[in-house]
């Protein structure tokens, strides 16, 4: 992604904690404001990197919606919020952290609502959503899963035949992940083309609207279990399912959509029936 002699083969998940600095109502979505904030921090650390990301058609960032304590009666001072940044190019992390540190004492306003920065979590173990990985390690999963259950934690949709598809079909999900992997992984870890002859064996999905500045985006939230019968396809799908936590899936992943995670039930059991689970609120 960035023009550097060495591209670290790492991926990162960084969590940013905020606190409300006023009372009132926060807009239902801050997708554009959060995206602009992250690019601002990166620019403070490396202006060239931010310019390249801004101009890119394939962003190395996935950014969640603002999560936290949204009271029906309105936000109160000190209410807790957070969002997550997935980074697919390891050369960006230092610029992001540098920009954050330079901004810690500055006033922060998102869509005309003031916040204060509380913390950044970047190291594995410091927050349940913070973490790091290596393309090389992800390329060699300790266990190949024939049944892969993915949780779609925010509205997820895909481009298909000049339109938008809201059902996460196997070929749409894994082709999306495959393209992003090959766009940012070092060349020695690139994955070969694959025909995804997979079946959807179970699912629990609902469509949700994610309100954005340009209008509502409809997508699916919930979980889907995919079954792979071919060994090579199962291995590649396992690699990409672990990658999904950092990359997101489908459209507008840098604007809050497509937040995705491999369900623990997939890793722990290949035969258990999917349990009904509460899906995290994306707004």
Image (cartoon, rainbow, N blue to C red):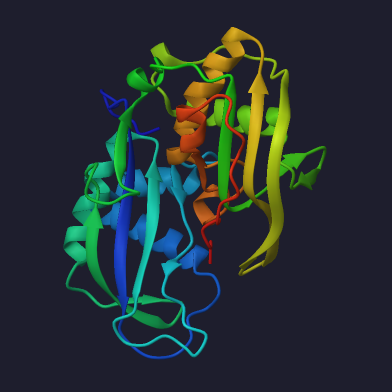
Q: Nearer the viewer, residue 3 or 99?
A: 99
Name above or below for residue 205 compared with residue 224: below
Relative image position of residue 218 (x, y in whole percent): 71, 58
Q: Nearer the viewer, residue 31 or 283?
A: 283
Residue at image point 58% right, 19% down: 146
**Res 112 quadrant in image:** bottom left
Name above or below for residue 10 compared with residue 122: above
Total marks shown come to 0
Relative image position of residue 49 (x, y in whole percent): 34, 44
Extreme residue toward the front, this view: 272
Name above or below for residue 134 compared with residue 99: above
Relative image position of residue 90 (x, y in whole percent): 30, 34
Residue at image point 45% right, 65% down: 66
Relative image position of residue 139 (x, y in whole percent): 41, 17
Q: Is residue 151 visible?
A: yes
Name above or below for residue 267 compared with residue 51: above
**Res 151 quadrant in image:** top right
Q: Nearer the viewer, residue 136 or 237?
A: 237
Extreme residue toward the top, this view: 231
Q: Is residue 183 visible?
A: no
């Amino acid at each position: 992604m960035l023009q550097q002699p060495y591209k670290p083969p790492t991926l990162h998940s960084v969590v940013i904690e905020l606190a409300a600095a006023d009372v009132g109502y926060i807009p239902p979505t801050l997708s554009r404001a959060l995206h602009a904030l992250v690019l601002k921090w990166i620019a403070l650390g490396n202006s060239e990197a931010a310019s390249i990301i801004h101009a890119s058609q394939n962003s190395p960032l996935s950014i969640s919606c603002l999560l936290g304590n949204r009271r029906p009666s309105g936000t109160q001072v000190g209410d807790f919020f957070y969002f997550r940044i997935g980074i697919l190019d390891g050369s960006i992390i230092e610029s992001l952290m540098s920009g954050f540190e330079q901004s810690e004492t500055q006033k922060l306003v998102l869509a005309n609502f003031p916040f204060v920065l509380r913390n950044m979590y970047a190291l594995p173990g410091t927050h349940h959503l913070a973490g790091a990985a290596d393309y090389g390690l992800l390329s060699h999963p300790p266990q190949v899963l024939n049944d892969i259950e993915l949780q779609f934690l925010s509205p997820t949709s895909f481009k298909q035949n000049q339109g938008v598809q809201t059902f996460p079909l196997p070929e749409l999900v894994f082709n999306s992940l495959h393209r992003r992997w090959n766009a940012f992984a070092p060349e020695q870890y690139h994955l070969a083309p694959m025909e995804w002859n997979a079946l959807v064996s179970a699912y629990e999905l609902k469509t949700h609207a994610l309100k954005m500045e340009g209008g509502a985006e409809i997508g699916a939230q919930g979980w889907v279990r995919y079954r792979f019968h071919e060994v090579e396809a199962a291995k590649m799908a396992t690699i990409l399912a672990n990658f999904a936590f950092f990359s997101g899936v489908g459209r507008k992943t840098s604007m809050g959509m497509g937040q995705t995670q491999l369900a623990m039930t997939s890793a722990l059991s290949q035969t258990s029936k999917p349990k009904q689970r509460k899906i995290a609120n994306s707004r």
